[in-house]
Image (cartoon, grey):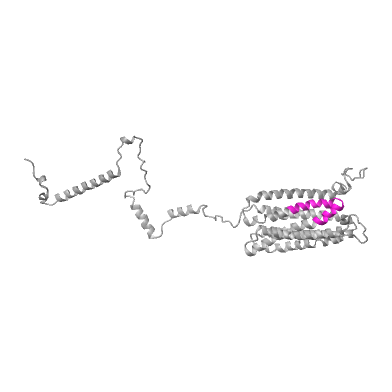
Amino acid sequence: MDPTGAPKGCGSSISSIYYNLCDLTTVWGVVVEAVAAAGGVSSFVLLITLIAFLPFVTDKKRKGTVALQAGILVFTLGLFGLTFAFIVGRYSTSCDARRFLFGVLFSGCLACLAMHGLWLALLERRGRGPRSWMLCLGALGLWLVEVIINTEWLIITVVRRPPGGVTVPDLSCSIANQDFVMALIYVMVLLLAVVLMAIPSLTHKQWRKDGAFILITGLLTVAIWVTWVVMYIHGNGVVGNPSWDDPTLAVAVALNAWVFLILYAIPEVCLLTQEDPDKEQPHDGEHVYPTRSLVCDSILKKPESPLQNVHLENKAFSMDEPPAVPMKPVSPYGAYNGHVRSRVYQPTELALIAKGLSKMDQDAMYLRATQSSLHPGSSGSLPRSATSLPS
């Protein structure tokens, strides 16, 4: 102790209710404070990481549970902050925060876990689970029940005055340990629901890991709660050191918050980066581009039907034939070479038609003359002007 009365590690200007945060003679306060501070920073960083990973999540089904995971991280961050309320000394504000926030924060975490387990159970049974907004509404409804219970209990116990009108200082801090535990019955029911909801999902191959994380988190939470309830109600009194009530609750809150963080939040964030198993993936031996492979196979593969053989043979013999007229239209300005229009002869359509008809007449006359010369006595059939010669 310092001459001023402050314990070792604390300054003289620090109030006595904060001695547990800096007292080096009672190490539990400093250790739990460090553990809670590290957990609060980890929860905040993990929450930012979860929000940053959200655009890169390819599994649409798993993406629907991101809101529940974010809710658990927020409530876990609140639990690490609540730990400091059990480290500092008892006064009206700290006692009210303990009684109200203990059940509210734990019920928020357990409500999100219960809805995630329900989503896995429905997904395993029906092949698809509820939508994200339905999960959020369900978790919100379960959480609001505990909020209403704690609000009523806090109002009744604080506003109520003992008979005779005698005012009791710090009435919120004079609640018996048994009453504090009895006010958390609804939270225990949620904890039991988390364990039961996680069991059916263990049979589903794809979502077995998620169910295992929820089940392990629920079982360890049950073990922690059984331990601190026994110590808080009976253990500290039997040992004869009731001053360990606050350290018992502080250690239980910090330890349970780390269980939520390590066994559920971190693995679920890691699973978000996995590919969607329902998405079609190319199997071994198949090409990435199936259309191209089918074209190559049809060319290289030996034809099986006789029609294909005939088609190939006809295609081979057709190489001696003149090429067909291309179907692509030719521009009328394709032969333009830059000369002046007046210097280049450009026949019109009528001229081309007349030229074609005259050429056809000449060919017909030539064919008739040739045919008539092949028969004997055909000279008589010639015109007179052709047989008579000038003298």
Q: Is residue 93 magenta?
A: yes
Q: Nearer the viewer, residue 382 or 77?
A: 382
Coordinates of residue 364 in the picture (x, y in percent): 20, 49
Quarter occupied by the N terminus: top right
Residue at the (75%, 62%) spot, across then down: 190
> 331 above or below 155?
above
> 120 above or below 40?
below
Coordinates of residue 326 in the picture (x, y in percent): 36, 48
Residue at the (86%, 48%) spot, across then down: 18
Coordinates of residue 371 in the picture (x, y in percent): 16, 51
Residue at the (77%, 48%) spot, across then down: 38
For the record, the magenta segment spans: 74-101
Q: Main secondary structure of the magenta part?
A: helix
Give the side of residue 375 with respect to residue 189, left or right.
left
Does residue 41 appear anywhere in the picture? Answer: yes
Quarter occupied by the C terminus: top left
Q: Nearer the viewer, residue 41 or 309?
A: 41
Q: Is residue 245 magenta?
A: no
> 333 above or below 129?
above
